[in-house]
Image: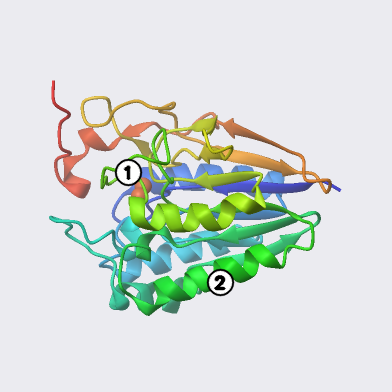
Amino acid sequence: MTFRLTQISDTHLSDRVPGFRANFDLLAEHLRAARPDLVINTGDISLDGADRAEDLTMARDAHEELGLDWLAVPGNHDIGDDPLPGCRQPANAERLARWRAHLGPDTFVRDVPGWRLIGLDTQITATSLPEAEEQMEMLVEALHGTGGRAVAVFMHKPFCQERMDETDNTYWCIQPGPRHRIVDLILPQRPAFIANGHVHQWRDRGLTEGLRQIWGPSAAFIVGDAWQETVGEKSVGFVEHLLHPDGSFESRMIPLPGLVRHDIGAMPEIYGPQKRLAA
Ligand SMILES: [Fe+2]
Ligand SMILES: [Fe+2]
């Protein structure tokens, strides 16, 4: 039987932004009726869990109220980000511990008929936290015990924008060092797809290395053209993955009618003014 998996992403939940909550409530109503077999949130579940435990608990409770089986991996707004120069909220032990206290593990391995689903924490990959190495060990083990299942990987940040050999240390992607480590591990297993969030754009594209990388849109907001290049589609919505037991699958973006396409660039009260793109 086909396994119906719904990927939601970048819900950015908090009591302080009713508009994002309203989008989530609409999505939740849809999901309660559609009853997928599993919901996976690919990160930025909270508005500012990196500094506020109450945002994490609010996001967790909102997901519990779905009454569905659900999993999540953390995003930069949940546990902090790569320790690049100027990073205001670097991922660290305290932030990771807060996530684990309120949301549980930051990675997962879940077997469903014909498939192994692996959730990775992209936010710690460029840190020296012991959990970063533990995650790599977990990944090796998960990839070697698939028993012939198809593999799908869920994570917050994409590997790259266009090519795996990009060398920039960018806010939008996993840093080149950890990217190559992870890709070298997963490529021989030929994963069916990699699903991520973070960019707040929908895109479904094969990469040169033969990996299919599916970018889930945010359910909360887009980043307007003055502040972010368009490399996919700037929609709000979610992704439905239909996983067949023989390893074949179909993925599509669903732009749920009624979701408000907020633009974070026009809401400087939330994360401060966005940095304008060079003209
Ligand atoms: Fe986000
Ligand atoms: Fe993010």
Q: Position of residue 128 (x, y in %)?
A: 30, 73
Q: Residues within 10 Å of mark 1 (few under 14, many from 20)?
A: some
Q: Residue furthest right?
A: 1
Q: Is mark 2 within 8 Å of ligand 2?
A: no
**Which quadrant of the structure image shows residue 45?**
bottom left
What residue is shown with label 2? 138
**Which quadrant of the structure image shows residue 78?**
bottom left
- 72, above or below 267, in the image: below
Q: Which tag is nearer the camera, tag 2 or tag 1? A: 2
Q: How is the image coloured?
A: rainbow
Residue at (83%, 46%) from the top-left corner?
Answer: 246
- Is residue 239 toward the left or the right of residue 121 in the image? right
Residue at (49%, 65%) from the top-left corner?
Answer: 61
- Is residue 235 toward the left or the right of residue 137 in the image? left
Q: Residues within 10 Å of mark 2 (few under 14, many from 20)?
A: some
Q: Position of residue 17 (x, y in %)?
A: 31, 49
Residue at (63%, 52%) from the top-left corner?
Answer: 188
Q: Quadrant of the C terminus?
A: top left
- 227, above or below 22, in the image: above
Q: Secondary structure at mark 2?
A: helix
What residue is shown with label 1? 172
Q: Earlier in the sequence, mark 2 or mark 1?
A: 2
